[in-house]
Amino acid sequence: MQVFITKLIKITSVVSVSLIFLLGLTSLGNAKTTVSAEVQYIFNTFSFLVCGFLVMWMAAGFCMLESGLVTTKSVSTIVAKNIGKFSIVAIVFYLGGYNLAYGIPEGGFIGSFTPWTLNNSIEQGYSGSADWYFQMLFVAATCSIVSGAVAERIKIWPFFIFSIILGGFIYPISMGWQWGGGWLASAGFSDFAGATLVHACGGAAAFAGVILVGARKGRFSPKGTVKTMEPFAASSIPLTALGTFILWMGWYGFNGGSQLALGTYEDANAMSKIFMNTHLAGAAGCVTAALVTRLIGGKTDVVMMLNGALAGLVSITAEPLAPSPMLAIGIGSAGSIIMYFGTQWLNKLRLDDVVGAIPVHMFAGIWGTLVVPLSNTDTNISTQLIGVVSVVTFSFVLSYIAFYALRQFIGLRISDEAERLGTDVAEIGVRAYAIRD
Amino acid sequence: MQVFITKLIKITSVVSVSLIFLLGLTSLGNAKTTVSAEVQYIFNTFSFLVCGFLVMWMAAGFCMLESGLVTTKSVSTIVAKNIGKFSIVAIVFYLGGYNLAYGIPEGGFIGSFTPWTLNNSIEQGYSGSADWYFQMLFVAATCSIVSGAVAERIKIWPFFIFSIILGGFIYPISMGWQWGGGWLASAGFSDFAGATLVHACGGAAAFAGVILVGARKGRFSPKGTVKTMEPFAASSIPLTALGTFILWMGWYGFNGGSQLALGTYEDANAMSKIFMNTHLAGAAGCVTAALVTRLIGGKTDVVMMLNGALAGLVSITAEPLAPSPMLAIGIGSAGSIIMYFGTQWLNKLRLDDVVGAIPVHMFAGIWGTLVVPLSNTDTNISTQLIGVVSVVTFSFVLSYIAFYALRQFIGLRISDEAERLGTDVAEIGVRAYAIRD
Amino acid sequence: MQVFITKLIKITSVVSVSLIFLLGLTSLGNAKTTVSAEVQYIFNTFSFLVCGFLVMWMAAGFCMLESGLVTTKSVSTIVAKNIGKFSIVAIVFYLGGYNLAYGIPEGGFIGSFTPWTLNNSIEQGYSGSADWYFQMLFVAATCSIVSGAVAERIKIWPFFIFSIILGGFIYPISMGWQWGGGWLASAGFSDFAGATLVHACGGAAAFAGVILVGARKGRFSPKGTVKTMEPFAASSIPLTALGTFILWMGWYGFNGGSQLALGTYEDANAMSKIFMNTHLAGAAGCVTAALVTRLIGGKTDVVMMLNGALAGLVSITAEPLAPSPMLAIGIGSAGSIIMYFGTQWLNKLRLDDVVGAIPVHMFAGIWGTLVVPLSNTDTNISTQLIGVVSVVTFSFVLSYIAFYALRQFIGLRISDEAERLGTDVAEIGVRAYAIRD
């Protein structure tokens, strides 16, 4: 009897210790963490919401940046385009874009255009609504890139229709190739937060738009020089700066939130390193542009400093986690130089990108994606190149077709008279400023 | 002896296992969660702080929105009114407003005007200071609604006194009926984040103010048409847009934080769904206004798009959790239409609401509250109607009395000469803009 | 055998219970909390990131505040200075500033100028990158204080060089005396979030700069009166207000994040109380300035209200945790009065501080530091005085030397012709505004 009891106790002890251990393991999510699955879930979800509202804030940043850089007679229009497109893509991404991207078969090419449905489970690690919220704001960012480039001469409603096409179809499809687990992900491509999937994709769409809508009248002189001062002077430098600061702030959420988790020691460290590297790359881009414009042009060009910061931020977006801080500085700095010469090159091509969206987002985005293998040893340059070329080509070709069709069937460009009056008067009926001092 | 030891071990084992189990249960807060009470406490508290600073940010949004929509000669004044009122209500809410609302007896009508005192305990689930901080910012939002409506002709100090009355007495009393556990809560009324308690309450106060202070000189022609262009043109559309984006961002905190908790799986899911629904309702409101103004008026009215987004956000505020995303889109869209026709109706009544605060906050707020039963089956239309009517009537009547008394005893409206010069010169002594290009 | 097994079980039980107990204790971080060390780590790290992006946001606030307060011909320059300095100090703080401050020996005077290196460990309680990120943004704030004071006549590149000196050397050294555990910390000095270490330090540097660079031409009439209206009128009051709201928002992170932890009941309560006290001090500062200017000058001076709010916020920065809310109101209110008379006094001295940075940051910062013993009984007035005098003297003397050297070797002030044209045209080549209505 006593032996039996003793044995029973022994067995009970072993079983209970094992159970506690198992319980522990289960609640961990993975073996390395002591954080329970539910606490991880809350951390991950909340980080989606916090990083998400930072990315939402970037929509305001784009709106202010573009409002500041266009001429005074197109500011109301750029505001209407920004808030309108921001609203439209949310609805389209809910109605079909999300599943077009994330409903993709493993290694596949396309998901299905069906409404998003809620999926909450502890195993998933975060709330499905929070995930949708975060991902939806990346669509808005992609479409924002286009609106600045084609400003001041595109009609507002064709632009809205294009936003539906870009935000509802083009971006979700090519993004799904990677983040939805499609063929690019299977091929080993790496784009942490979307230097190619968001920025180069949006930049390529902008490129197509700029070609098809044509330059603003009088922007390029017959001799090929560019008029940057009157009548093309930026309406408000402080609003441009505000927009840049907003975008910079939002970028912490854009890159940091792309860790997609916060609920372990490793995730918290990763997100922190991403914040730091993102900041340093932006800083390096700004300082580099200040030095370059001062040394080359004589003046310290404030607009280039602002775009330099953005180019630095775009450059680090493909891989904000792996690089050392020093490498992040280098990547941002080089991205700024690429943006600077890219801007000159577009001007030589007589392509009128009003806010510099193509050099900032597409050129620096490509640079950032190609430089990933320098710090992330799981990648290689050829796969990175395949990813860049396929996404950029896909976005450019489909955007070109879409803009072309819009031009043929509805008309893309405002009338000469409307351009003379400005889109604010012609299309919106509200002047942007009524300031008398 | 050996038997005794074996028994002791057995008993110890059983007791210790039971204790561990009990400890586990206690630390859960409730049986459904594995999150300890202290971790829940930190999550809840931090979510109050994060959502709180988003709601604080709405004060800047109101300030920018109103600065952009008033004419250039009243911008310094609107700034002074916004930052001043924002500051005043914080102190008043600390000195008495909080306890006037939350010190209410269960099912009762009014608490006591006594200073807030600190109450921290694990059982309460969050820090008392964080709760005060979050709730205080709702007072600021309520008072912000008034300042835009009566802009450009109200005297600044009478406005400050009215802010004390509204923020220190009117709002806390009627808000306490519901959120303090007063008679409206007992009656089964439901207003998740304050479509009626904040927005319709503030809108009703604005309504009383607009009636008593009268329209700006020359706003309505003798024939009854409205002058919206010069000399009543909005001073800055980009600032108006900035204000709208800020308010939109803040609304995630306004609605999401009203979940009042984050520390469980259920709370994290709820907050996420609220962020998503809030976003979609705002987006739908904006898109709807763009379509309506384009189809009816020919131009795509950017100010209506911005106010449409806000009307959508107000509409979903009464119940941002229960609706499906599709219903959230519908609620926001309808709210925008109500705002549009409400604006026209006020103009017909020759009521001069400078920024459209009444249609956006009161009309859409009422709509949102009445539509709650569609998704929240615990509510019914008659109780919702009782809540709306009682809060709106209470706020309107008391505000009317307060404004009336101020008009009789101090004077509410600036002199004709001051109105000609603009309040900036007459009352503040600082012109808003000195921009030479 | 049976005895052996029984003993083994007994020993195993005791050991396992002890282990569980020990594990529990270890995971607590301290005996009073039930939060595991890893969960604490995530909370602490995330609070650094969230509070950090709020402090980053203050950089935009300074930029908007200064853009609004300078005259229209210096706005592009102030933007370039703000974004440039913001970028430069991040790199300098990474390259050496951080270790200059935190590599200080206990009770010592100076650390070593070596690059920051990553240090992550559960025992440290937070991610090293998050700590760097948070602390780096304090450097940016310190340098922001200077740029507004010396605006409109300092050359941009000498200003950048001075930012390297202030952000890379002066600030990190004297900050290390306290927060790095140097001699001031050993002496018992207390400065919770940097009223002296950040604000008075930056203000003293600004003071040196204002003396050495001289007043703007025509600012002070021969009779000693100040011209505040044309040609020195603030370019945009709404941008100034926006900057103030941004700074206010950022201050929650500045003070709240200085708790340096969130992961326990006590930390969550502390951070909440800090948010509340910070808010009330700012509110009191604003209301006080409104009353003072209305009673003394007749007009309700909006710029003084904005600076009053900031002075209130600076005042509470030395000790935002210990005071009762009522005392926080008093401290903020008094700080605002000190700022008001300090502004008058600087004008009498004919020192041209364009944005009021010295009275807001230095005078109110000193006040806030000296008043700490009123609520924090671990401090005394003489040690507080020693801290204030040593940091302010150190910053002032070294800044004076640096500015003097820059003046001698590169030149500090723009030419008379450049000042007539404005720095925007002379140094940046981009006018800030091209607004036609």
Image: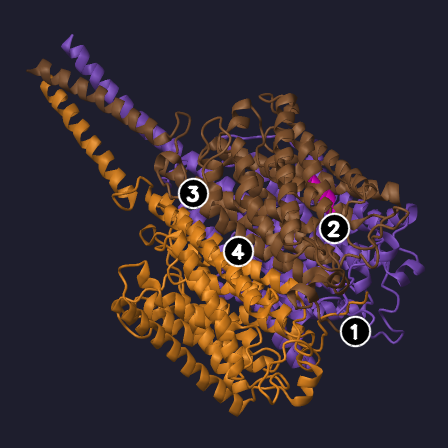
Chain colours: A brown, B orange, C purple
Whether labels 3 and 4 belong to a single chain: the reply is no
**Crowding at mark 2 (Cα within 10 Å: few <14, some 14-19, many 20+):** many
Say which residue label 2 marks.
Answer: A354
Which of pointers 1 and 4 indicates the residue nearer the eye?
4
Callout 2 amino acid: Val
Q: Which residues are magenta?
A: A306-312
Helix, strand or loop: magenta stretch: helix
Q: CA distance from mark 2 to mark 4?
A: 27 Å
Most foreground residue, A240 or C36: A240
Q: Which mark is residue C229?
A: 1
Say which residue label 4 marks.
Answer: B249
Left or right, B125 with reference to A234: left
Q: Position of residue C270 (x, y in %)?
A: 46, 51
Which of pointers 3 and 2 indicates the residue nearer the eye?
3
Chain hosting mark 3: A
Assess whether residue A308 is covered by the magenta stretch: yes
Say which residue label 3 marks.
Answer: A114
Chain hosting mark 4: B
At 89% from the left edge and 46% from the top edge, which residue is drawn? A298
Q: Which mark is residue C96?
A: none
Q: CA distance from mark 3 to mark 2?
A: 36 Å
Q: CA distance from mark 2 to mark 1?
A: 36 Å
At 55% from the left edge and 23% from the top edge, which residue is drawn? A187
